[in-house]
Amino acid sequence: MSSRTYLFPTEGEPLTLSRRLVEGLVFGKDILPQYAGTRQKIATVYLEMEGRKPVRITGAQGEYFVFDQKGDIRRGLTRSAGDFMNAAFPAPPNESGSVVSLQPKLSKKRAEEEHRWAVGKAELDRIAADIWPKAKSDRLKSAKGVSVRRPPLTNDARQALEEASADLWKISHAIDELKEPSLKGFAHEARSRAVARPEHEPLYQAMAQMADERLEILRRRRVGKGVWYALVDVIMWDDNREGHSLGRFHEKCEGKQAAVVAARKLLAQHAGDFAENITVEAEVLTDLEWQARCVDFGGD
């Protein structure tokens, strides 16, 4: 599986967005100042591959990139993620429990309307022409980003950052140890403390968001539905038991059981790579977990 991303401006031809540029935009390393202060349609298509050759479009997703006055999308991405999280984790029902709130459905509908759009036949046809061109004019131009100039990291700043982040691992470790009911309480209390202690509000809000994400991962693992990924990593180990990946392979699936079957298939395909100092390791991940790993696996 692979993917390609396109920007559909209000006027003019669409532009391709390279994977490197998309990652740069997401992590704040790049900006698109030509779109500063605008909201642009973004389409991502998922491709079935035979070797390095795309053979079929298997799916598409439309979303909006909201650019700030500098052409940065991070604030818009944060708002989008927050809206979908709020829709996924609504406020608890009233004490009587006799009234079913419509708020979750309304919140999800509003989030979909504001942050998503349906990729239609016209857009898919234009994308297909770019992927499988019949003429030179079918090829779309690439969007050109601008690298954000990094301020110098002084020794004092580096030391302060190291000191401030030395124990950050404890936060994720503590959250990962909690079960679903405890995660709900953790997130609620963290947001309450953010209001009560404004000097630490960003930190408490970040912890609440981490708990929300962990809760959603556990829910998806329990339900087993939605998009999942099968992963296989071929790793060579040196004498110090330090591993170096020789090859990473993945497959996008619908549902956990399909991902398990796909992982077994990938294991069988690469079983011949196993050796005294080489392991072949498989796992299945939800799409949320995949986002943290897809760069390593070169995936969509």
Image (cartoon, rainbow, N blue to C red):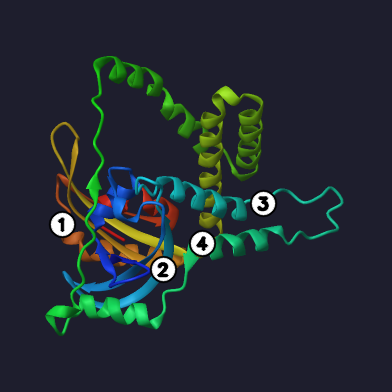
Do we see residue 32 in this rendering?
no
Report the label total.
4
Q: Amino acid at mark 4?
A: Gly
Mark 3–mark 1 Cα distance, whole angstroms, equals 48 Å
Residue carrying label 3: 90
Mark closer to the observer (3, 1) = 3
Q: Answer with mark 4 or mark 3, whichever residue precedes in sequence.
A: 3
* Quadrant housing the N terminus: bottom left
User: Which numbered disc covers residue 224?
Assistant: 4
For the point 26% across and 66% down, which residue is it?
Answer: 15
* Label 4: which secondary element: loop
Q: Foreground mark, 4 or 1?
A: 4
Instruction: Tell me if I can see residue 211 in this picture.
Output: yes
- Left or right: 282 in relation to 212: left
What's the residue type where badge 3 is placed?
A: Pro
Which of the marked residues, 4 or 2, is nearer the chain's N terminus?
2
Relative to the observer, which residue lies in front, 286 or 56?
56
- The residue carrying mark 2 is 61
- Disc 3 crowd rating (10 Å Cα; few below 14, some 14-19, many 20+) is some
Give the residue at mark 1.
273
| Picture coordinates of residue 224, whole percent (x, y) | 51, 62
